[in-house]
Image (spheres, grey):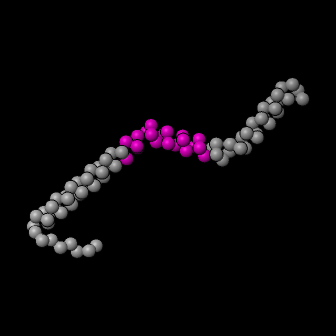
Amino acid sequence: MQTKKYSSYAQIDNDLEILKIEKEISYQKLVLSIEHTKESFTFLNIAINVLDTVKSTFFSSYGAVLRLVIPTVIKWFRNKKRGN
């Protein structure tokens, strides 16, 4: 970062005020982020996230297998019921 040259104390005060406001904005963003994080750790949100993860993992990994196996199992039960 290049050193800035000031010609008056008013310029220094202006830059200090800008930095103070930027610091406050960053602080408020941090506080808001912490609040959102706290809200996301409720039991309901955790349960929903776990169920979504299980569902997406199960159906992406086993979806193709289930589409092949389920009709075969149904056909087997139908034939077994008839005594074949």
- In depth, the one of 20 and 63 nearer the eye is 20
Residue 82 quadrant: top right
- In depth, the one of 61 and 18 nearer the eye is 18
Q: Which residues are magenta?
A: 37-57
Q: Is residue 40 above or below residue 10?
A: above
Q: Is residue 75 above or below residue 4?
A: above
Q: Is residue 40 above or below residue 76?
A: below
Q: Position of residue 2 (x, y in %)?
A: 26, 74
Residue farthest to the right?
Answer: 84
- Left or right of 44, for residue 16: left
Q: Is residue 58 above or below residue 7?
A: above
Q: Residue at x 13, y 63 (%)?
A: 13
Q: Position of residue 45 (x, y in %)?
A: 45, 40
Tell me the quarter of the image containing the N terminus: bottom left
Q: Position of residue 75 (x, y in %)?
A: 81, 32
Tell me the quarter of the image containing the C terminus: top right
